[in-house]
Image (tube, rainbow, N blue to C red):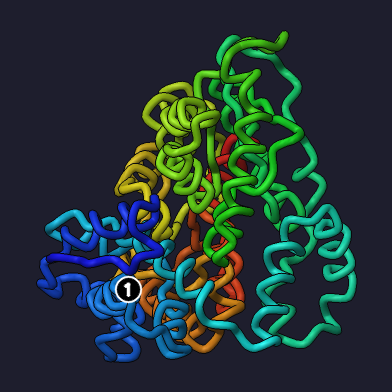
Amino acid sequence: MQTKLAPEFKGTRQGETAEAILRKCVHCGFCTATCPTYQLLGDELDSPRGRIYLMKQVLEGAPVTRRTQLHLDRCLTCRNCETTCPSGVQYGHLVDIGREIVEARVERPAGERAVRWLLKEGLTSPLFGPAMKLGQLVRPLLPQALKDKVPGAAGKRAQQWPTRTHKRKVLMLLGCVQPAMMPNVNSATARVLDAAGIQTLVADDAGCCGALRTHLNDTAGGLADMRRNIDAWWPLVNGLTSEGRVEAIVMNASGCGVAVKDYGHALAHDAHYAEKARRVSALTRDISELLPDIVPALQGKLREIQTKRLAFHPPCTLQHGQQLRGGVETHLRGLGFEVRLASAESHLCCGSAGTYSVLQPDLALQLRDRKLKHLASAATQDPVDAIVSANIGCIQHLQSGTATPVRHWVEVLDDALAG
């Protein structure tokens, strides 16, 4: 594909990257079969191939309309199409570029601008924690749409962080919303690693991974978040503190894992951060990637498993963004859990997709209910004790549509260790 870029994009990083990605696409249409929005809407422009056509036109200087923006907004950035694509098109990078360009050319209605500002500033604000606690106090009085976004208050165990020191140390990102919404995910991760002889460290100055602002078309803000995290982590990465050097940067929210593993790409053209970003990305591991190492250390430490029958929803950010498939269910089965996948479409997005469930609620709810239906079908003969996943957004989104408990798999493993 020959792409003649509009003058203002020639020679820019965005232009060069977009042109290279566009040239890879052979328009075979394989991606339409695994695109959630195309499955729901049946509109070619709501498929990866259709959006690529739109972005190609934009980059070539064609007029940009509100309709173009809407089709790009509807993309979940689930990256299922990348798994399907025979040409290796990095669609996730391309749609970020396309959205940034369209955002600069098409002014959104005031209401949309306000909501997007509140999301990117509110979810990363120090005030988010107190606001969430207030929401939990008045949760029964909230309208259903807000109640669906506010989980119940965490128990006392969520505040129990292991105190033992170990020779092996890892660094963990707490995240921007997870400490307030589901703090037990972080403490459970630390306890499971502690049981395996690994100490979990946290850099106080680290915050949002950068994905939230990036996917809301605030590229500069997303890059600033990335640089701040690198600065916060660098002393521990280099062993410059009394804690020594960490062997990995561990992510227990798979969405953050995708973003941090991409720091090297995002900051490749930053002379001051490129090498640091590359090193941080190379050190980053999803918690599931540690399972082959820690499972042998946990053998024999599990008490009687109370929550044994599990339905596992692998988030898109895990199976498509990070290309990690099969590890969680395989190793949990090896520890004595019964793990099932959805009876169909286990590869499709649940509709959470970061802030997507807020910005595109109708589509998000359709995808949620579709996912829950297939998860329920997998447990028809023998009901499951819980649905487990690996990303806070998926967990809360799915929980809003079912009475079955939805948890992070590491919490269930932690419970089994505690007895």
- Residue 46, x across and y down, in percent: 33, 83
Nearest the eye: 41 or 62: 62
* Residue pointed to by mark 1: 55
Q: In this rendering, is residue 296 above or below 325?
A: above
Q: Residues within 10 Å of mark 1 (few under 14, many from 20)?
A: many
Q: Residue furthest front?
A: 7
Quick check: can you spot residue 322?
yes
Q: Secondary structure at mark 1?
A: helix
Q: Position of residue 217 (x, y in %)?
A: 55, 65
Q: Is residue 193 above or below residue 368?
A: above
The answer to which image quadrant residue 188 occupies is top right
For residue 392, side relative to residue 84 (left or right): right
Asked if residue 312 shows in the view, the reply is no
Residue at the spot 31% in from the left edge and 48% down from the top edge:
323
Residue placed at 32% from the left, 66% from the top? Answer: 346
Residue in the foreground of this view, choosing between 162 and 62: 62
Query: Could you tell me which residue is drawn at 80 percent across and 61 percent down?
Result: 153
- Please tell me whether residue 104 is drawn above or below residue 188 in the rendered image: below
**Which amino acid, by three-letter code, is at mark 1?**
Met
- Residue 81, image quadrant: bottom left
Q: Does 34 sit above or below residue 17?
A: below
Q: Quadrant of residue 60?
A: bottom left
Q: Is residue 233 left or right of residue 118?
A: left
Residue 227 drawn at (x, y percent): 61, 38
How many numbered discs sit on the rendered protein?
1
Q: Residue at x 41, y 29 (%)?
A: 282
Compared across the picture, whether 349 is left or right of 39 comes to right
Q: Quadrant of the C terminus?
A: top right
